Amino acid sequence: MYKKVKGMVGIEAAIVLIAFVIVAAALAFVALNMGFFTTQKSKEVIARGLEEASSALEVDGSIIGKNDNNKMSGIAIPLKLATGRTPIDIKKTSIKIVTADKVVILSADSINAIHEPQSSDPFEAAATGGGAGGTGTKAALIEYQGDGDSLIEEGEKWVLVLDLAQTLGEGLDPYEKITVEVKPPVGAPLTV
């Protein structure tokens, strides 16, 4: 009636138990590795989002206005690259000017880049194109401190000069509000 039944020997049980532990350890390693990978990817996405949301440009000093016949005919905005940001190509930067009744968008082609201006007065440098001739323009980016290329880089000093009389058709009246938005190719625009 009773058949001879063989039981598991202690060494066989130990081998099976070790196999289960090895498989569980391998699965735990895979799960942890995937968690670390997901965390790293999330960190990269957040960093890219913050880079896009923050402006690469900063105002570097006082904004200056030029007055002609009780109207503001020009504005000069000193600019610099924000700390830790990649250089900005001014040939790909656009400008939007907003007043109560006008919106003017200046493409990168309509912004004159001036290197090594002859005058320390930004309005004079923009009006003369940086040299002795008179090449007045609606907008000029003047590089006062830099290496002479079209990139706004760390440590460089640039001034954005807008001729409001040319850009808007007339200067601004006293207490008239104006918003200038400088839109680099990457990152949020700088709004002044």
Image (cartoon, rainbow, N blue to C red):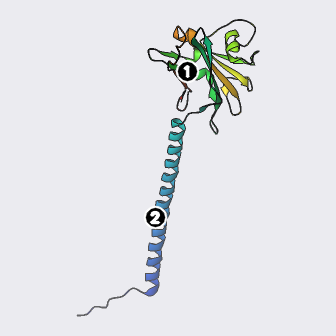
In the picture provided, is 117 more to the left or to the right than 169? right
Residue at left 54%, top 17%? 107
Residue at left 44%, top 14%? 101
In the picture provided, is 50 more to the left or to the right than 148? left
When asked about the image quadrant of residue 113, the answer is top right
Q: How many marks?
A: 2
Report x, y in % for residue 147. 75, 26
Residue at left 48%, top 76%? 18
Report x, y in % for residue 93. 57, 23
| Depth order, front residue of 111/158 | 158
Q: Is residue 141 above or below residue 60?
A: above
Distance Cα–Cα, label 1 vs label 2: 53 Å
What residue did someone put label 2 on?
27
Sequence-wise, the earlier of marks 1 and 2 is: 2
| Depth order, front residue of 119/12 | 119
Identify the amino acid type marked 2: Leu
What residue did someone put label 1 on?
94
Identify the amino acid type marked 1: Ser
Report x, y in % for residue 134. 70, 6
When asked about the image quadrant of residue 69, the answer is top right
